[in-house]
Image: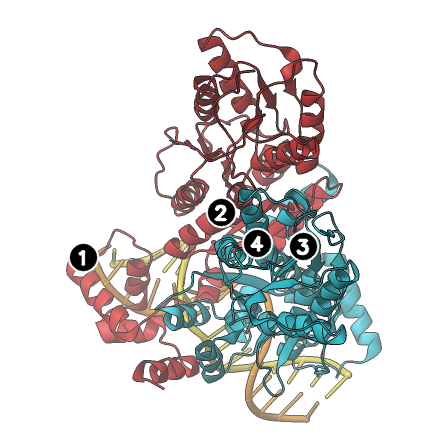
Chain colours: A red, B cyan, C yellow, D orange
Amino acid sequence: MTDQDQALARQKVKAPTIFDVAKQAGVSIKTVSRVVNAEINVRASTREKVLAAINELQYRPNTAARVLSGKRFYVIGLIYENPNEFSYVQKVLNGALKACEAGGYTLLLLPLTLPNPDLIQDVRRFVSQSRLDGVVLPAPIGDFTSIQRLLTDLDIPFARIAPRMPLADELSIHCNDEQASFDVTQFLIDQGHQQLGFIKGDPIHAATAHRFEGYLRALKANAIEYHREYVQDGQFSFESGRSATRALLDLRSPPSAIIASNDDMAAGTIFEARERGLRIPEDLSVVGFDDTPIASRIWPPLTTVRQPIVEMAEALTGLLIQKLRGESVDLAERAFACHVVTRASTGPRRVN
Amino acid sequence: MTDQDQALARQKVKAPTIFDVAKQAGVSIKTVSRVVNAEINVRASTREKVLAAINELQYRPNTAARVLSGKRFYVIGLIYENPNEFSYVQKVLNGALKACEAGGYTLLLLPLTLPNPDLIQDVRRFVSQSRLDGVVLPAPIGDFTSIQRLLTDLDIPFARIAPRMPLADELSIHCNDEQASFDVTQFLIDQGHQQLGFIKGDPIHAATAHRFEGYLRALKANAIEYHREYVQDGQFSFESGRSATRALLDLRSPPSAIIASNDDMAAGTIFEARERGLRIPEDLSVVGFDDTPIASRIWPPLTTVRQPIVEMAEALTGLLIQKLRGESVDLAERAFACHVVTRASTGPRRVN
DNA sequence: CTGAAAGCGCTTACAG
DNA sequence: CTGAAAGCGCTTACAG
């Protein structure tokens, strides 16, 4: 064992307490508490003495004691839909975890399977049993008004990722889906495509409407007529992508490019095209959204739109922590930029 | 608000304590404590009175108070590699979460990016700052002897999923990879394949050796000669699957079927085969392992081997909790069964 | 089988 | 700007 190991082994026997720090610094425990909690009424020289003692003793406040005596739990909950395709949640999780670590909070998870008839009861049990200070709600969980109401009633602040209907004074974050969809549609148009199929996502997600709007705007900007039959509903699932593609390819005049509102559906599009012996991109260009792992593993690799989800979740969780600490939070719109990742599933329109 | 909502709102103001329960049941708080902690020295009739009071008041012990006064933290850590392809970890997470919820424990996460020069320091900080009682270590994290040593030094019990070298008296769990690999190889042989390529995984994983052994056993059982050049090294990544496949397909007499040691590498095999214009399964049969989401989304869908990872992680975490409670734990070998999932990426050997 | 007392390590509420 | 006291809700160690 190194010296540090031994020090830690000792620490396991008896970790330094606020009393040890107070003695070392020659102040009362209350003053140490003030420094630890970054309160303002401490003389600079006192603060420095205390910080030096904390550093020397490697003091870390005992969370259990803080929780027991105070009004905070230092716990944030992450409530998410637990889908088969997990990469979105994984990124949210990574971002939230980073922010919690930085802010001295613990992150607790509640995976939910939808539809769930006991949704509210499950959330309520989680929130009260886990004694949460605040909750992060990624889409689409944040769009359930029943959950919003429950948390409001329990007086538990929440922060939402990509909510469909922003609330007043709410902590939320999103990325510019509409612009990204415009960009990717324009990209296809620039390659000569005029017959552009579009597969919508699950309407519960805000992104579904925004991505569709970007598509419409790009058509308009290029004076391409909108054809109702080129637009199919989907639910963001692989299977819904397949069946939507089936409908599009069965048209008398099928599209030469299909924009699927996420990668999973785009994988369904490619799957269905292959079943029909179509070549991609020679016979059909395909794009997705989200740049999930499958996008770069499928053949041909998928042109898609990447969102900085990790950064978004980290920023949002950081804001929530600020709010929980009673610090002022800048509620200005926080929109992150998405961008198109060009791969081999798209190509110039084949001229017959 | 329903009555239950209102009850909860009140509870937020003032949750019942052990004193409330004691008064209601007409016993001391120590007796309530005994019942809550399932200690044995309580008369049955007393226990029932207490349980009735607990139930009536909806009493839940305050974890912070338990932690502060006791020696346990009621926290289990999950330390995992945070890869791009997350489905394995997702399943481990789901299983561990279930077991923790059932056992009244909280699950805390430490995602690790490998290779990590500060590995031990990161783990140490996590373990001591989060005040963990025990740790679950999925492969390959559980195979780092430095981590095992650290946890042993700190006297923190751990439980491992699919360890390479089982330790004496250790809590671990695995599935029968060797048999599954034998089965899937036999399946290909039954379809007429005699030239069987094999792509190994990352040697740090126990599964890598087991899967290779199953392949070898199947060759032997069918009197097929082992060709060294049909076996390529991989690291479980998509890219390593591609380059291994490149090597296999460049052989003068390339295999008619390729067994990749996981789905991600199998996706690389399909990718590379497509780049060369090969048809699957007509020109090349491909199988993977793990039945990750990509297996059913790729075209053609992948024949693969499914492991019950959620159940494995749940069982293992449950055992760890038993151990932490001081209950006796049955250390008998726990091997879960895998099984082959047949899809369209495999077919009869084409007769030239 | 049951209980009275001490104490875990902090924050709160109050005083100065 | 600083501190003394009370108390959060349990478990431990001890007694009977």
Report the Cα–Cα distance between label 4 and label 2.
19 Å
Of all residues, the one furthest to the left in this rendering is A45
Disc number placed over residue B264 in the picture, else none: 4
Question: Mark 1 Cα within 10 Å, few/some/many (few <14, many 20+)?
Answer: few
Quarter holding residue B6? top right
The quarter holding residue A352 reads top right
Q: Chain of mark 3?
A: B
Question: Regarding mark 4 in the picture, which secondary structure is present there?
Answer: helix
Q: In 3D space, how far apart are the residues under numbered discs 4 and 3 (Cα atoms)?
A: 10 Å
Q: Position of residue A329 (x, y in %)?
A: 36, 37
Q: Which residue is mark 3?
A: B291
Residue A43 numbered mark, or none? 1
In this rendering, the label closer to the viewer, 4 or 2: 4
Q: Is residue B63 above or below residue D15?
A: above
Q: Label 4 is placed on what type of residue?
A: Asp
The tag earlier along the polypeptide, 4 or 3, is 4
